[in-house]
Amino acid sequence: MSAPAPSKIRVAEVVAQFLAARGVRHVFMLTGGGAMFLNDAIGFHPAIQPVFHHHEQACAMAAEAYARVSGGVGVINVTTGPGGINALNGVFGAWTDSVPMLVLSGQVKRETCLATTPVPGLRQLGDQEAEIVRMAQPITKSAVVLADPQQVRLELERAWYTATHGRPGPVWIDIPIDVQSSLVDPDSLPRAANLHYPGRQEYADLPRILKGTDVCLMPFARNEATRFISPTKTLEYMAADRPIVSTPIQDVERFYSDIVFLAETPDAFVKQIEAALTEAPEDRARKQRREAKILAEQAWDAIAEDMETLMQTAWQRSLVGAMQHQARLVSRFPATITGPRRQIRISGAALSERKSKTDD
């Protein structure tokens, strides 16, 4: 048998690459024969650390806690039948508390799976099979069987978007084992719409929303209206830990040219987006260190403290200046600076002195 073309990879590897591209660094799992290709692809991906448990309920609860702490999406990988059923309790917790979670479950091959090969009146067809999607649907925002290997990227993108947008919650993708092992060309897979405008959002929701993106864009037109703007979006995107592509707005180019991908024309903008998506891990890590330093210096609390310090310093300087000016006046005109009564008395004395000279 000839070796597969290098351009093709298993569906399970597409799943692992998708997770890594979304910033997933830990996946909570319990291995099983029905999920072995997913176990292998996720477990050996260099950017992902598998966290193993003795029970699927613990996987789901750990993923929920992880999502709460990290602000991202908790991901779990379980096997078919009781493996998926055991995870339901933890998934229900994510459902009630609106915690984003992605469950990837293994399933028996399609020809013995009731979801893809229905047999009326039959409750189980394959060995260790369970119709987990029907069980999970009431406590998830979305639960589907991935029956077509060519739809893997599309279903992953839909699931991720659903989990992280609107009211967050768990989503579930059930992947038969023969789909997991199917070979696909990742460059030819259908994709969901890849440009999203979430509209005006609360600041507290931005990290969760931006976690679902690959790259953040600032395509400002260059004209007199934008010549001197300093977009706060730059710092917001840095806080979301996402690559940034922008037109060369003056302040962005001046302060962040070593972090932001800059492009002046539409074609260059597209090329810079591609560069951002394929950036080497060591280059991204270097930018992340620089971003962390900038964010520490530019935090709203730090800026407010700096402004208060500047105002206090300016006020103190103006007070000292006023006191010094008053002291100089006192030294020049000591009799006229002590108040209106003193001024009147001095004026009267001066008039009397003038009158006596006239009489003489």
Image (tube, helix red, strand yellow):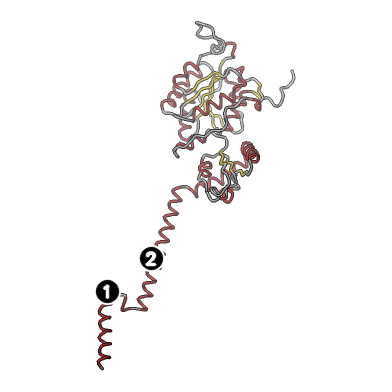
- Residue 70 visible at all: no
Report crowding for label 1: few under 14, some 14 to 19, many 20 or more residues within 10 A (C-alpha).
few
Report crowding for label 2: few under 14, some 14 to 19, many 20 or more residues within 10 A (C-alpha).
few
187 or 171: nearer the viewer: 187
In space, the residues marked 2 and 1 are separated at their CA atoms by: 24 Å
Residue 129 appears left or right of 44: left
The image position of residue 185, as x and y in percent, is 67, 25
- Residue 170 visible at all: yes
The image position of residue 306, as x and y in percent, is 45, 54
Image height of 252 relative to 143, above or below: below
Residue 167 appears left or right of 14: left
The image position of residue 216, as x and y in percent, is 56, 38
2 or 1: tag closer to the N-terminus: 2
232 or 219: nearer the viewer: 219
| Amino acid type for the residue under numbered disc 1 | Pro
Instruction: Give SS at disc 1.
Output: helix
Q: Is there a contact, CB below 8 Å, between mark 2 and mark 1?
A: no
Instruction: Give SS at disc 2.
Output: helix
The image position of residue 318, as x and y in percent, is 40, 65
Q: Disc 2 marks which residue?
A: 319
Tag count in the figure? 2
| Amino acid type for the residue under numbered disc 2 | Leu
Image height of 185 relative to 301, above or below: above
Residue 205 appears left or right of 22: left
Q: Disc 1 marks which residue?
A: 340
357 or 235: nearer the viewer: 357
**What residue occupies the far top of the structure in this picture?**
121
The quarter of the rendered structure image containing the C terminus is bottom left
